[in-house]
C-alpha cells in the first residue's frame, strides 16, 4: 500500500497553489496537472523510473509506457499510485466550490491549510503533555519558514543528561513521538 507522509497538508498546499493559476479549471485539477506540480515539490512521494525521470502518465493514469497501456499491459504498482493520485485530485475537486470565485476558493484552501497546521501543532503538544513527556524535558518548536507552500517543520527537543534534537515534518515528528511513548510505557 502506498503511504505518503503529510498527505493532508500537501493536498491543501497543492489546492491553494493551483487556485493561483489562470488556466481553465477543467485542465487544472486533473491527475496530469496535479502530478506535474507534485513531482516538482515532493518527487520522493512517487517512485522514479530507472533513469531517474518521473513515472509516465498517460490519460491520467500511471503507465509503463503509452504503447504498453494501449496493449493492456499494466502493473499493480502503477495502479496503486494512480489510485492515490486520483484520490488527491478527487479531494481537491470535491472541496473546490463552484459557486465561489477562484480567489474565494484560494482563501478557502488557505484557511483549511492554516487550520490543519494549527491542529497538527496542538496535537503534538497535547501528546507531549498527555504522556508526561513534557515533564521529562521534551518540548516542540515550530521551526517553519513563512513560505506557505513549504511543509511545516517542527523541532522535538529533549533536554536531559544530553540535549537531543529531532527535526522534521508533522508525521515525522509524530512517528518519533509515538516511538518514544512506546519506549516509555515499556519502562
Image (cartoon, helix red, strand yellow):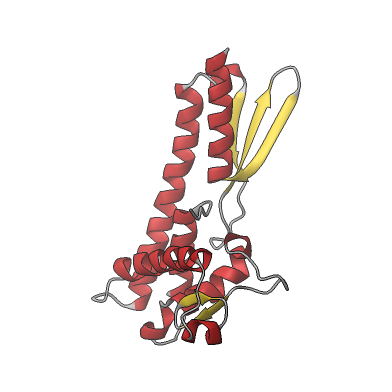
Q: Is residue 123 left or right of residue 180?
A: left
Image point (45%, 83%), residue name: 59
**Where does the C terminus fall, quadrant-wise?**
top right
Q: Above or below — where is 158 with respect to 145?
A: above
Give the percent coordinates (x, y) of residue 180: 58, 26
Horizontal arrangement in the rendering, residue 160 relative to residue 133 (left or right): right
**Residue in the image at 53% along x and 85% along y:** 66
**Total residue callouts:** 0
Instruction: Give the image quarter of residue 99.
Output: bottom left
Residue 174 against residue 61 in the figure, above or below: above
For the point 40% across and 50% down, the residue is: 115
Residue 53 percent coordinates (x, y): 68, 74
Query: In x, y percent, where is residue 3?
Result: 51, 52
Q: Note whether residue 20 is visible.
A: no
Image x and y of residue 64, in percent: 57, 76
Which residue ends up furthest to the right in the rendered image? 162
- Seen as rendered, the residue at the extreme left is 99
Amino acid at each position: 500500500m502506498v503511504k505518503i507522509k503529510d498527505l493532508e497538508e500537501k493536498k491543501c498546499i497543492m489546492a491553494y497553489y493551483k487556485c493561483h493559476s489562470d488556466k481553465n479549471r477543467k485542465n487544472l485539477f486533473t491527475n496530469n496537472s496535479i502530478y506535474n506540480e507534485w513531482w516538482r515539490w515532493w518527487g520522493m512521494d512517487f517512485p522514479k523510473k530507472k533513469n531517474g525521470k518521473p513515472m509516465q502518465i498517460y490519460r491520467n493514469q500511471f503507465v509503463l509506457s503509452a504503447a504498453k497501456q494501449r496493449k493492456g499491459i499494466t502493473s499493480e504498482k502503477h495502479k496503486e499510485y494512480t489510485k492515490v493520485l486520483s484520490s488527491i485530485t478527487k479531494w481537491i475537486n470535491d472541496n473546490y466550490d463552484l459557486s465561489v470565485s477562484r480567489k474565494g476558493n484560494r482563501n478557502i484552501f488557505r484557511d483549511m491549510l492554516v487550520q490543519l497546521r494549527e491542529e497538527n501543532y496542538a496535537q503534538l503538544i497535547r501528546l507531549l503533555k498527555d504522556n508526561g513527556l513534557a515533564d521529562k524535558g521534551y518540548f516542540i518548536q515550530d521551526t517553519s519558514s513563512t513560505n506557505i507552500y513549504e511543509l511545516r517543520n517542527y523541532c522535538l527537543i529533549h533536554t536531559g543528561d544530553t540535549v537531543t534534537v529531532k527535526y522534521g515534518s508533522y508525521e515525522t515528528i509524530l512517528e518519533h513521538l509515538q516511538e518514544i511513548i512506546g519506549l516509555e510505557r515499556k519502562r
